[in-house]
Image (spheres, grey):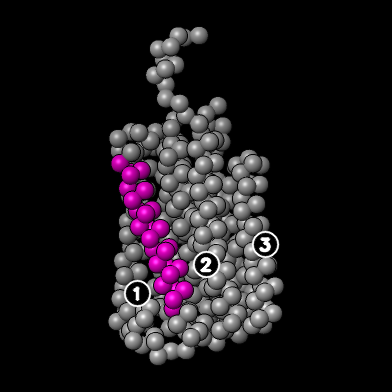
Amino acid sequence: MEHEAGHVIPYSTLVKVWAVLLALTAVLVFVSRVFHETLSVPAMLAITPLKAGLVFYFFMHLKYEGVLLKTMLFVALATLVIFLGLLFSDVLVRFG
Amino acid sequence: MSGPGPAAAAPHRDYQGAKIGMWLFVFTELILFGGLFLLYSAYRTKYPHEFHEGGQELNVVIGVANTIVLLTSSLTVAMSITAIQKGEKRRARILLAITLLLAAVFLVDKVVEWSAEIGRGIYPNGPELLKRPQGAIIFFGLYYTMTGLHGLHVLAGIGVLAVMLALLTKDRIRSDDYVKLENAGLYWHLVDVIWIFLLPLFYLAA
């Protein structure tokens, strides 16, 4: 009962996730150096949240957590996105 | 059933409660750094040119090296949790010790990096920085604030992980009671996630 959520993630899964994280970092650095005029910002906006997501999902065991925790995280992140939206509705009018 | 003896001796544990408590703390950290990221986005919109130039001055090699160091340390702490769950105590200790070592490497890199920048007069109120336009002063102000606050989290993480290593050694973290190590791991992964965002925003911003 006590360890109902204590899911054991195999070493091999963790190592694979780590390899993907390193590969994504390499792509991000490569794109930002070589295609910095065109692709750098889209790559950053796509790859960075993906990397963070992998850390949350596997390293932080989110994949094996219940609906409650996932919902709580969603609310926290949604709050940040709302702040970001409100901020840019202001910033783009002032400096845009 | 068994009387007060064994029941009273068994310490009260709440695995789910402990984890949810840690996650709530993680959320407050996300909002704390999130606020700083919002500040960064607003000023980057106002001073795109200065932020671009500021990013060019940062040491990308150290930035990327530290990313690899932190990602690897996240792996080792996650593996140490798997190890203790499987009852592999020695392996769990070794993996945690490697995590601590990598955390120390991160801070050493940080000292090397900051020393070079401070040596050039680029620091808040530094003589060289004050000659720059307002946008550059804000860029480096945010750089020192955000990587500095992150660095403090790394330092705190070293403290937390060192305590976990001691608890592992004393057998107070075991295959049937490891939520402390899991929560310390959650904190360490959070530190990693924040760095994942700091890398493109500062080092790759150019």
User: Which residue type does callout 3 highlight?
Assistant: Ile
Q: Which residue is mark 1?
A: B113
Q: Is residue B51 left or right of residue B174?
A: right
Q: Within 10 Å of the Cα at label 2, are there few (<14), some (14-19), or many (20+) other Cα atoms?
A: some
**Which mark, by number, is residue B91?**
none
Relative placement, left or right, of B179 versus B118 is right
Q: Is residue A78 above or below residue B118?
A: above
x and y percentages locating residue B166 in the rendered image: 30, 41
Segment colored magenta = B140-166
Q: Which chain does the residue under circle 3 lie in? A: A
2 and 3 marks on the same chain = no
Please name which of the two marks, 1 or 2, marks the residue nearer to the observer.
2
- Say which residue appears at 40% left-offset and 90% top-offset: B131
Looking at this view, is B177 or B133 the one in front? B133
Q: Quadrant of residue B64?
A: bottom left
Q: Are marks 3 and 1 on the same chain?
A: no
Q: Are marks 2 and 3 in contact (CB under 8 Å)?
A: no
Q: Main secondary structure of the magenta part?
A: helix
Q: Which dot, 3 or 1, sits closer to the camera?
A: 3
* B162 relative to B35, above or below: above
Marks 3 & 1, CB-CB < 8 Å contact: no
Residue B160 sits inside the magenta stretch: yes
Q: State the mark number for residue B36.
A: 2
Q: Secondary structure at mark 1?
A: helix
Q: Residue at x 46, y 57 (%)?
A: B191
Q: Is residue B123 above or below residue B81?
A: below
Near mark 1 (Cα within 10 A), the count class, few <14, some 14-19 or many ≥20, is some
Q: Is residue B5 above or below residue A58?
A: above
Amino acid bearing label 2: Leu
Q: CA distance from mark 1 to mark 2?
A: 21 Å
Q: Which residue is mark 3?
A: A82
